[in-house]
Amino acid sequence: MAEQLGFLTLLPPVIAIILAILTRQVFISLLAGIFLGYVILAGGNPWIGFLDTLQGLVDVFADAGNTRTIMFCALVGALIVFMQRSGGVNGFIASIDRRLRTYEQQRSGSSRTVVQLLAWITGFLVFVESSISVLTVGTLYRPIFDKLGISREKLAYIADSSSAPSSILIPFNGWGAFIMTLLAAEGFANPFGTMLRALGYNFYAFAALALVPVVILTGVEWGPMKHAERRARAGKYLNDGAQPVVDESLTSVEAKEGVTPRAFNMVVPIVIMVICMPFMLAYTGWADAREIVGTGGGAGAMIFQAIGSGSGSTAVLTAVTISILVSIASYKVQGIFGIRESVDLVLKGIAGLIPLALLMLLAFAIGALCKQLETGIYVSELARGWLSPGLVPFLVFVVTCFIAFSTGTSWGTFAIMIPIAVPMAREMDANVLMAIAAVLGGGVFGDHCSPISDTTILSSLASATDHIDHVKTQLPYAGLAGGVAAGLYLILGLL
């Protein structure tokens, strides 16, 4: 397929990304890219392309994992509404504000710095799943950032830059299990050990993660982020004409009259969701772990393997559902909401996140289209013919970045590039571990920057900012970390 279509395989994702950045109409841009791709597959027939586009959108729901992820995104809206209407957000703001005032008395002018560092640390610690990480950081800290005049674009950057990098560097999660599966398929006897050794060469993840506190502590901002910070200090949360991914009705819900603000009602639902995540990963992966580890394995090995073998989409959907149910019960016991009012709020939250669910649908659809077009394979094979051993890590990183950026998926990019990069490095006597790390780092970089990436979309959602504004403000920082990583691969590869 890729050989027959040639450069045409690149057009759908590239056109979608360019249109999204130029027009700021993400939905229309993604639909245009999807339609163009199916027209190409139909041999230039627009009518068949139109029908296949509709079928492609329907086929997204044929994958249970996609359906669960879309449901999860919609249900998160219920938690957002709950935490605001119950007075949890106001209570959390008051709690943090008291602590900041105390800190401010000791060290004047440091509140903004402390809050940003706390957001970064929170994102790093919630490494079990990148989606949970960005949602936790955005939901918890958005009200505080607004109060202190820190831009929502800055919050989205912090959330995005501390999620996937920490998930890939601390691989006790679905990321690690997926990568180990790919490495085992390439003949590595100890895929876990190989993955851990390769992590030391994952320069992009380290650079992206380390750059955040440097930016926070130095206060140095450049590019669109500098403008966003100036605007936020003047009291404007969003740019003129901005279109937040989350519906404004979700971020402007007033606390119920007469309710005592308590941080408890905001923190507990999120904590429950985060705790349920690894538990459900272990639960859904236990049967597979038993077959892999066998009766001779210890409890620690079983739990680790189970978490790695679990279903991420099942885990997040179950976690958010349990969190909603516990919240409903808690609010009922406290006398805040009745059951009927809680159900109404759930529906209100779901309605507010319908745009996000639609965006995820389109992102999944264009990802599936790219697989049919074999976009990643075409780019990989194009570069393979002119690589030299010393350039393997550098060019693998660059090609992987482009594939992930174009397709919006790091996992799909890993699946494409590891089976190509590992044999290539072996055949050309290049550093195999560095080539593996280049794939992992490049996948995270491309996924980090792509406007059609689910993690990037969720970062915009959690921070209630315009999606394209998030992409534009983040790109200079991600580009710097990516440039550092590319330079290190080039230098070390040639040594």
Image (cartoon, rainbow, N blue to C red):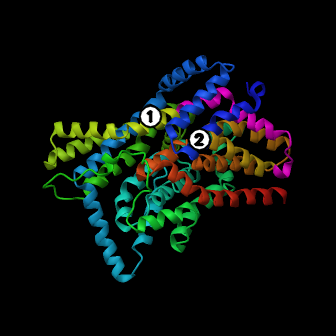
Which label sits on residue 19? 2
Q: Earlier in the sequence, mark 1 or mark 2?
A: 2
| Spatial CA span between label 1 and label 2 | 18 Å
The one of 167 and 189 positioned closer to us in this rendering: 167
At label 2, counting other C-alpha atoms closer than 10 Å, the crowd grade (few under 14, some 14-19, many 20 or more) is some
Amino acid type, callout 1? Leu
Residue of label 1: 358
Quarter occupied by the N terminus: top right
Looking at the rendered structure, the secondary structure element under dot 1 is helix
**Location of residue 19 in the rendering, given as x and y in whole percent from the top left corner:** 59, 41
Looking at the rendered structure, the secondary structure element under dot 2 is helix
Image vertical order of residue 320 relative to residue 483, above or below: above
Residue at (47, 68) in percent of width and height: 230
**Location of residue 297 in the rendering, given as x and y in whole percent from the top left corner:** 54, 40
Quarter occupied by the C terminus: bottom right
- The mark closer to the camera, 1 or 2, is 2
**Location of residue 407 in the rendering, given as x and y in whole percent from the top left corner:** 62, 38
Residue at (40, 59) in percent of width and height: 237
**Residue 197 on the magenta segment:** no
Q: Main secondary structure of the magenta part?
A: helix
**Location of residue 270 in the rendering, given as x and y in whole percent from the top left corner:** 34, 50
From which residue to which does the magenta span run?
364-391
Residue at (54, 64) in percent of width and height: 212
Amino acid type, callout 2? Leu
Which label sits on residue 213? none
Image vertical order of residue 106 relative to residue 157, above or below: below
**Residue 368 on the magenta segment:** yes
Q: Is residue 367 visible?
A: no
